């Protein structure tokens, strides 16, 4: 691994992110990009929402100064700039869900049509040969990109969760690239990791980083979602694909399942699937009696298990059909449990007490 690492891009990404996180704090207050406590947000005081902008600038500067990864792919940064701007406007003015969704599809179109980074095949998920999408791959990619962006946006509910989940996905992806002999490609996820680490340190008030609490905001969660789906599509499609598409699904399995279960429950109740509520996985953990840190650790462990299943399946070449139907089966079980979570919790509590 170390033979493939280039320290300069990583140090620049880390350093620029660190400086930007500090510099953007007073600017965030001037621009009104701060999060205020409310019934859904239990933090103390006004917290800057500029973590995402800081990470975007760090990755941009590192990539262009060192000619690593995306310097020759300006379309990524074009799409990323739009999604960060959209997130900042949403953080500041609370845009309508429909307007935000339309803009997200526009960003996805840059990725699929302009950059030609789109899903052409789902792999042999049926057991009867590769499921090639042809021209439909463009439309399918738009839906997938918007879905992943919103999955990471929805999971961003407690300190460290969206960033921690992203870290798990990016580390897993880097490990897989090494295992399959594509170590030269690991600088892409590693630069994002380098920009994420200082944010997580400030966000979680880790010793030495206390006193500058900051959130990534919608700009950050959507930017991270776009970056991850861009990389996953890039590494799973085409003749030079490094990993199988179903493996990528498992790497981001928990955010996808949480989003799917939430949207299904809202639809059943006749609510807007995009309307925020307090029924996310982290809300359930905390209403069950867990502290914020306990919920964070518990959810990240579950997310890591999902990623580990994907890694094991890739390494041992487990049938893509088994991996696919296993995921669908787990999604069904997860959805049933989430729909009946309070009954399940009461059942277990009664068993423990007796």
Image (cartoon, helix red, strand yellow):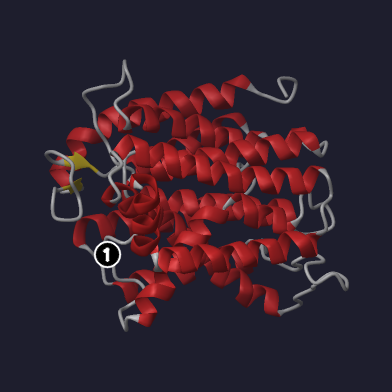
Question: What residue appears at the point 14 percent right and 42 percent down from the top-left corner?
Answer: 30
For this view, does 339 lie left or right of residue 330?
left
- Using the rendered view, name the quadrant where residue 163 is placed: top left
Closer to us: 266 or 159: 266
The percent coordinates of residue 214 (x first, y second) are 27, 36
Q: Residues within 10 Å of mark 1 (few under 14, many from 20)?
A: few
Question: Outermost residue toward the top?
Answer: 208
Question: What residue appears at the point 45 percent right and 67 percent down from the top-left corner?
Answer: 261
Figure check: 44 above or below 123: above
Closer to us: 38 or 291: 291
The percent coordinates of residue 209 (x first, y second) are 30, 21
Would residue 56 be seen by someone viewing this image from the given angle? no
Secondary structure beneath dot 1 equals loop
**Quarter containing the N terminus:** top right
Residue beneath disc 1:
277
Figure check: 289 above or below 263: above
């Amino acid at each position: 691994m170390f033979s493939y690492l280039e320290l300069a891009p990583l140090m620049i990404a880390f350093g620029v992110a660190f400086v930007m996180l500090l510099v953007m704090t007073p600017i965030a207050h001037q621009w009104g990009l701060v999060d205020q406590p409310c019934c859904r947000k239990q933090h103390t005081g006004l917290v800057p929402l500029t973590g995402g902008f800081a990470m975007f600038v760090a990755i941009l500067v590192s990539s262009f100064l060192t000619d690593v990864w995306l310097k020759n792919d300006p379309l990524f940064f074009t799409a990323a700039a739009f999604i960060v701007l959209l997130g900042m406007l949403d953080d500041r003015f609370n845009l309508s869900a429909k307007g935000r969704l339309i803009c997200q599809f526009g960003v996805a179109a840059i990725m699929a049509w302009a950059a030609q980074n789109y899903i052409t095949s789902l792999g042999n998920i049926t057991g009867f040969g590769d499921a090639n999408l042809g021209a439909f791959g463009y439309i399918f990619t738009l839906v997938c990109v918007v879905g992943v962006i919103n999955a990471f946006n929805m999971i961003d509910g407690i300190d460290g969760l969206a960033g921690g989940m992203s870290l798990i996905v990016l580390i897993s992806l880097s490990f897989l690239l090494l295992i399959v002999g594509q170590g030269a490609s690991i600088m892409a996820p590693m630069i994002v990791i380098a920009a994420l680490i200082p944010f997580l340190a400030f966000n979680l008030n880790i010793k030495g980083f206390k006193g500058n609490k900051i959130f990534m905001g919608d700009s950050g969660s959507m930017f991270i979602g776009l970056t991850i789906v861009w990389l996953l599509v890039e590494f799973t499609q085409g003749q030079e694909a490094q990993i199988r598409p179903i493996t990528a699904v498992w790497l981001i399995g928990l955010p996808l399942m949480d989003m799917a279960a939430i949207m299904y429950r809202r639809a059943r109740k006749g609510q807007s699937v995009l309307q925020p509520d307090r029924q996310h996985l982290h809300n359930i953990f905390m209403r069950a009696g867990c502290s914020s840190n306990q919920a964070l650790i518990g959810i990240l462990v579950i997310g890591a298990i999902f990623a580990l299943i994907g890694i094991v399946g890739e390494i041992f070449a487990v049938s893509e059909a088994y991996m696919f139907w296993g995921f669908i089966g787990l999604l069904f079980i997860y959805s049933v449990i989430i729909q009946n979570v309070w009954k399940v919790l009461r059942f277990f509590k009664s068993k423990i007490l007796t």
